[in-house]
Amino acid sequence: MCLVGMAVVVGAILKFRLHPFLALMLGALVVGVLAPGEASFAGVGKRLAEAFGTGCGKVGLVIAMAAVIGQCLLVSGAAERIVRGFLSLFGVKRAPLGFLSSGFLLGIPVFFDTVFYLMVPLVRTFAKSNPEKFILALLAVVAGGSMAHSLVPPTPGPITVVENLNQTLEATGQQELDLGIMIAGGLLLGVITIVVGYLYALWANRVFRIPMRRTAMSELTEFEPDPERRLPPLSAAILPVVIPFLLIMMGTIVTSLWGKSTDTDYPLAGQIVLMLGDKHAALAVGALVAVVLALRYRPAGMELPKVIQSALAGGGVIILITAAGAAFGQIMKETGIAEELKDWFSGPEAGGKILIVAFVLTALVRMAQGSATVSMVTTGAIMASLLQGVELDFHPLYLALAIGCGSKPGPWMNDSGFWVISKMSGMTEGETLKTFSVMLTLMGTVGFLVVWIASRIMPMA
């Protein structure tokens, strides 16, 4: 039934061009009817709705707040200030490192396509005086933004994987994955993988010698500084990104050092820290700061309500997809698939098998339908159903990171990001395959190897 469900989801997207939300719900419905488990298939619709509502409740507010943060960063000029701050820090000679670092930071609250749209005019402007480093700078943006998108919450993929896994881990009495731990682990692995990506970019820039070409889109996006535009100071621009991280990490530290059975066992100060360290509150504070920046620094004539509406409209689509993924996973759990595979996921190599399956399955879904987020949502739901009959011998962080790395290999023509990069950079399809596609595949594979080795050496169980 697991394979049938995946086939329905992927086939609906590829063959019939259905939206991922509809494809995931259809897959869940088919699995629920064909393998209802202990329940009657007459109640599939009700179970599907309940699972969808639960999934939406877990990730909906977080994704909405992250969307507001990302949109307000763009409108206020804070995103541009962050990029310029990193470029000033590294200097002209090492500007590609500035693109790499700022792309990684902005890739956390802002969707990758948007990060690329924002930064490619700056890359083209830099390449006018440094044409020999065009591909290096371009790939540096891609390396930074793409890895943050798959590894560091509050982007939809990682946070949905955490929620899916935790639902099963809690039900089976196993160690749960704290969001602060996921952020720390995602940042650490992200730094390792973007270094790998940057090294490949250096090699590709030297070997392929792809020139910067004029494109239909480049005429519209050539960057010309607006002397009248006020940008927020860097210290304020980074606050919407940094504050949620700090609050969540503080909550994690308090829980780890002074863990109590219930929240009421903490003193008042501890309860305040835990309240602000909750992912919903932390992202809400970050969103509030981002809105204040947008109010003060938005372009003249731009109405803030329309900015928020645009952000929520985009975030709403992602919420639907992630909640549908949660419903798909819950129906999979109820089929009893975990019991069927329990014997295979047992023994001394069980942990290694689970990580390999998670990575390969995510990569296959990604290559089949093109979206990194959908591949993470789908595989996270399936792996959560498999965990019902398995006891992990390592920290669940490694499983979540393996899924994140699996969403990178094999991007090609069915990936919207592939065409955004190709058309805005002026590269041909072949050039995009041997630069963008190869680099992401390398980064994801190396990242997984790091995760696998770390799970063996430092299981943290």
Image (cartoon, rainbow, N blue to C red):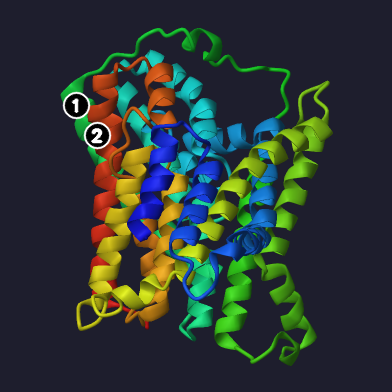
- Marker disc for residue 169: none
Q: Residues within 10 Å of mark 1 (few under 14, many from 20)?
A: some
Residue 125, percent from left and from top = 46, 17
Quadrant position of residue 440 = top left
Q: Are marks 2 and 1 in contact (CB under 8 Å)?
A: yes
Q: Is residue 421 left or right of residue 42?
A: left
Residue shown at 45% from the left, 41% from the top: 145
The residue beneath circle 2 is 202
Dot 2: what SS? Answer: helix
Quadrant position of residue 419 = top left
Would you place residue 90 above or below residue 446 in this image? above
Residue shown at 19% from the left, 26% from the top: 206
Q: Which is more toward the observer, 46 or 149?
A: 46
Residue 5 visible here: yes
Q: Amino acid at mark 2?
A: Leu
Q: Is residue 400 left or right of residue 412?
A: right
- What whole-number distance in Å separates the C-alpha atoms at marks 2 and 1? 6 Å
Q: Amino acid at mark 1?
A: Arg
The residue beneath circle 1 is 206
